[in-house]
Amino acid sequence: MSLVVLDRDGVINADIGEPITRPEDWEPLPGSLEAISRLHKAGHVVAVATNQSGIGRGLMDLAGLHAIHRKMHDAVISASGRIDLVVFCPHTESDVCDCRKPAPGMLYTLSERVGVDLTEMTMVGDSLRDMQAAMAVAAQPVLVRTGKGQQTLDGNKGLEHIPAFDDLAAWTDAWLVSDDP
């Protein structure tokens, strides 16, 4: 069993450039729901680890975040998939916490809950902080060019060793083929 951890905004759904605070603003990226379904059907545990500073900044409350995540879960279920776990950091950049990416706290939490060694975890994200969190725990980082991904690639030297894909669906296609005996 392996654990696939996905960032939310820019990987599963469109990154609108500001915190998504209402379910109606959450829109899946093309192919992302089907990719999650394929990962689930292949027997992988699928989790989401997402920074949600909108809570810490007072832009939304927990009920609002849960409504957004309910929409995400329902959309994945409609595509015959499942997200097994969602963890989030409600803090702002100025808060001192160990969960806000690039800190690896959410990845430690997921590893413990699922019982998977961190080195058997793949973190798919679109930002430098996603990649840094994965590298901090020796998980496999994967960058997608959706969301902030292309900007991350263009603006950061030293990421050449990290696999980069056009989107979650392209990575899933490649990874499931390489994972197939």
Image: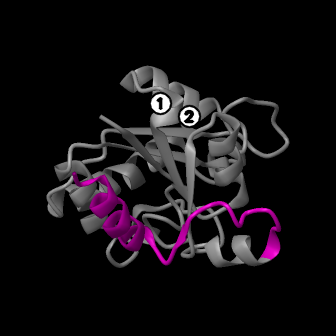
Residue, disc 1: 110
Colour mapping used in the image: one colour
Q: Nearer the viewer, residue 82 or 91?
A: 82
Q: Is residue 119 magenta?
A: no
Read off the magenta span. Answer: 155-181
The residue positioned 58% from the left and 50% from the top of the image is 60
Q: Nearer the viewer, residue 65 or 47?
A: 47
Residue 172's mark?
A: none
In the image, is 104 to the left or to the right of 26? right
Q: CA distance from mark 1 to mark 2?
A: 5 Å
Residue, disc 2: 107
In the image, is 52 to the left or to the right of 26? right
Residue 27 seen in this snapshot: no
Which amino acid does the dot numbered 1 rest on? Answer: Leu
**Mark 1 near mark 2, Cβ–Cβ under 8 Å?**
yes
Relative to 129, residue 139 above or below: above
Q: Position of residue 87 (x, y in %)?
A: 49, 37
Relative to 58, residue 17 above or below: below
Secondary structure of the residue carrying tag 1 is: helix
Q: Is residue 158 magenta?
A: yes
Query: In this view, which residue lies farthest toward the front?
Result: 181
Q: Position of residue 176 (x, y in %)?
A: 29, 59
The residue positioned 17% from the left and 51% from the top of the image is 41
Count residues near mark 2 (Cα–Cα under 10 Å), then give few for <14, some for 14-19, many for 20+.
Answer: many
